[in-house]
Image (cartoon, rainbow, N blue to C red):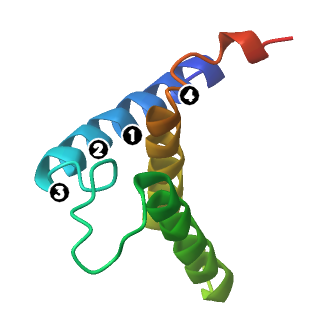
């Protein structure tokens, strides 16, 4: 499998995972219930990123789930920020 095909496969699979998780969790990352925490959605996503990075730092091995979670949270943050197109970053 060539590089381009691998990238498209990874991102497509991650997209499917995020859609399913978003459905299962009721869009809680972008529209939190705020019952116990009063963080806005951006703060909540960034807190989850910090928590996940600490878990990676303290782990003896890098796990697929950790990478998927980090990629997912960064994607959710991009959605929240309306950063939907990255073609402007191509040199």
From what the image shows, is residue 43 above or below residue 15? below
Classify residue 79 by image quadrant: top left
CB under 8 Å between callouts 2 and 3?
no
CB under 8 Å between callouts 4 and 1?
no
Name the residue carrying label 3.
25
Is residue 63 visible to us here? no
Name the residue carrying label 4.
7
Tag 1's secondary structure? helix
From what the image shows, is residue 88 above or below residue 2? above
Check disc 3: other Cα within 10 Å, few if <14, some if 14-19, many if 20+: few
Tag of residue 17: 2
CB under 8 Å between callouts 2 and 4?
no
Question: Which mark lies nearer to you, 2 or 4?
Answer: 2
> Which is more toward the observer, 81 or 66?
81
Residue extending furthest toward the right:
91
Question: Which mark lies nearer to you, 2 or 3?
Answer: 3
Question: Which mark lies nearer to you, 3 or 1?
Answer: 3
Question: Which mark lies nearer to you, 4 or 1?
Answer: 1
CB under 8 Å between callouts 3 and 1?
no
Q: Residue at x 54, y 47 (%)?
A: 74
> Which is more toward the observer, 59 or 5?
59
CB under 8 Å between callouts 2 and 1?
yes
Q: Residue at x 45, y 38 (%)?
A: 80
Tag 3's secondary structure? loop
From what the image shows, is residue 91 above or below residue 64? above
From what the image shows, is residue 46 above or below residue 75? below
Name the residue carrying label 1.
14
Q: Decide which of tag 2 and tag 4 comes sooner along the chain.
A: 4
Q: Is residue 44 left or right of residue 3?
A: left
Q: Decide which of tag 3 and tag 1 comes sooner along the chain.
A: 1
Q: Decide which of tag 4 and tag 1 comes sooner along the chain.
A: 4
Figure label count: 4
């Amino acid at each position: 499998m060539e590089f381009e095909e691998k990238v498209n496969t990874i991102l497509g699979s991650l997209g499917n995972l995020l859609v399913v998780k978003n459905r299962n969790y009721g869009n809680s990352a972008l529209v939190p219930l705020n019952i116990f925490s009063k963080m806005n959605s951006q703060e909540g996503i960034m807190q989850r990123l910090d928590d996940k990075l600490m878990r990676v730092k303290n782990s003896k091995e890098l796990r697929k789930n950790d990478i998927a979670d980090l990629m997912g949270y960064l994607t959710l943050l991009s959605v929240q920020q309306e950063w939907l197109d990255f073609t402007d970053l191509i040199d």
